[in-house]
Amino acid sequence: MLQRVVRSTVIDAPIERVWAVLRDFNSHDQWHDVVETSRIEGGESPAQVGCVRNFTLKDGHRIREQLLALSDEQHSSTYCIVEATVPLQRYVATVTLKPVTDGNRTFWHWESTFDTPPGRERELRDMVAQGVYEAGFANLRRHLLGSSDTRAAPAGRVAGRPPGEPLPARQMRVSSHGGAERLQPADGQAPPPGPGEVRIRQRAVGVNFIDIYMRRGWLPGLFPLPGVPGMEAAGAVLDVGDGVSGLLPGDRVAYLWAQPGAYCSVRTVPADQVLRLPAQIEDEQAAALLLKGLTADCLLHDLGRVRPGMKVLVHAAAGGVGLLVGNWARALGAQVMGTVSTEAKARIAREHGCEQVVVASDYRFADAVRQHFGGGADLVIDGLGQAAQQENMAALARCGHWISLGQASGPLAPIDPDALVAKSLTFSRPVVFDYVATRTQRQERAQRLWDALNAGRIRVPPIERFALDAAARAHERLESRGSAGALVLLA
Amino acid sequence: MVRVYISSVIDAGADTVWSRIRDFNGLPAWHPGIADSRIENSEPADKIGCVRHFHTRDGGTIRERLLALSDYEYSCTYAILDSPMGVENYVATLKLTPVTDGARTFAEWSAEFDCDEDRAAQLSEQIGGGVFQGGFDALKRHFGGRR
């Protein structure tokens, strides 16, 4: 009885890139692990229909296959075995690619029919399905990663190892609380993914103020020593544990996770925390934007309930969160005023939608805010902390809402309830992780962020890049108030 | 002849997705752009040749004839009989293919039609970007949160 094998997958690359490899009838020795050597007989072109390729496999078998059809229009190639030391008879196979138009990915369909000697049907079906087709999917993914990005070279090496081994991971570790110099490179390990986990080859790691608070020892409960800081990163899935669905090796992903440890090159995390990235969002952008963008989404949509005409004051308006918040609030119809510490930053904030910018390196801004808004701000988004407390109270309008997001200048002193009652003020002290506690919340908020970026309602802030080993310099830069936009570490 | 092609990957098995979209009279149950639907002459919705008569949410009335339905290929082909869109010879196919590594489905929706040349781009966007992608987005939302 004729046997039929069908396997298919989705490759996270445009169809042109996948087809460039697969249309070459003589390419398998470059990307498919089972093929040792490949040559086209008679010196013909591999695009010549009727040409014969001659394979030597790693296990010593030899196969001669003839190209029966090749279509650049249909992205398909059909071939048959003309002679082989494996007992596949009347074997005809077709590879077909189709574009996934939403996401610019590629659907790859590989199917064949063949006869086998009696009793060996199952063995040979499995050999074709798993040994050739499924292995080919994984091998091509790795090949595309390696050729598109030289920094992915280590991922290529690790993907070739047997599963279930820990992998070396470069980490930036903090052994005692203190200054940026406490961040020291160390050689750690990423364990193989257990049930429900994935292991990620990280390309870009987001740097946030919370990382600095942890390093300084302001959040001891969340960051026991020795520890690796970092709440978010982007990269590619290396391998997945049992029970994980919807994520495959090679998938481009990003995560944010309340458990620190992202300052490293390879990390194993719960699959639940991981989001697939749309094709148009680069790794660096994802690492720069995920936590900050989801923070902005919570601040504006949930806590601040920003409406058209609302008067919003954004501190550190040229910082990673500040630029996104100002930009997005403006897109929602709010009037946006920002404070920054230098003229250069004022220019960047204005470019991102901040209508009025005050340069207030001395934390004096309340008068300017009351004057500009004619009464005060309905919403203050504050990462400054203690040094700006009195000015924030003074800058708020009646029934205004002060959201304290961070405390760059130092931890906030206790707030006297009577200080709120004077103008019926509201004070919020949110932690973004409480607003992204479920997978659905993370997905919905991330989707809103990607949609807003795609539609051009908000812009990607400037990104400053540092090597992972230079994490200490990135911290110094962020603490110096010298940076604008978002900082990422490249692993 | 204008050709529109939209494809997507949906996070559910092909059988599951097919059971949601197979009913030729079932567009209002899964497509956000469709308000109501009925099959003319009380025919079964899976009888080849039957005509569905439905309204879009913006008030348009469309009549479409079922040309082919395959539970084996997970595909459905139909032609427009009447619509306010100004298209001629409109034939569309909605087709699913299982993705064997993981419970996912590759979904394709394509159409060919004739129209005034100066309206081709706008109609392609309306049909491909609006109707087809809108349907796939709804399916992705529906099946995306199941895990």
Image (tube, coloured by chain):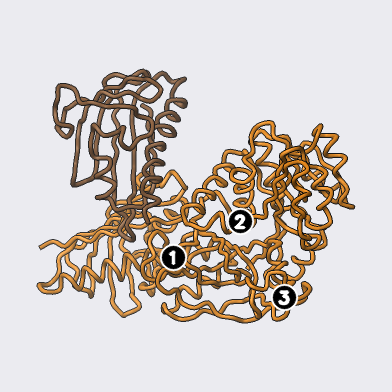
Identify the image quadrant of residue A173.
bottom right
Q: Residue at 74% x, 65% y: name it.
A: A474
Q: CA distance from mark 3 to mark 1?
A: 31 Å
From the top left corner, tell me how far across and down residue B78 is, in percent. 25, 30
First reached walking from the N terminus: tag 1 or tag 2: 1
Residue linked to disc 2: A432
Residue linked to disc 3: A183
Residue linked to disc 1: A249
Kindly check if marks 3 and 1 are in contact, taking CB atoms under 8 A apart as contact: no
From the top left corner, tell me how far across and down residue B75 is, in percent. 24, 41
Chain for numbered disc 2: A
Q: CA distance from mark 2 to mark 3?
A: 24 Å
In this view, B5 is above or below A472: above
Residue A140 relative to residue A289: left or right: left
| Rendered shade, chain A | orange
Q: The C terminus of chain A lies in which quarter of the figure? A: bottom right
From the top left corner, tell me how far across and down residue A225 is, in percent. 66, 79
Residue A477 relative to residue A133: left or right: right
Q: Nearer the viewer, mark 2 or mark 3?
A: 2
Query: Do discs 2 and 3 share a chain?
Result: yes
Q: Nearer the viewer, mark 3 or mark 1?
A: 3
Residue A15 relative to residue A461: left or right: left
Graded by Cα atoms within 10 Å as few (under 14), some (14 to 19) or many (20 or more), the crowding at tag 3 reads many
Helix, strand or loop under label 1 = loop
Q: Residue at 24% x, 34% y: name it.
A: B77
| Rendered shade, chain B | brown
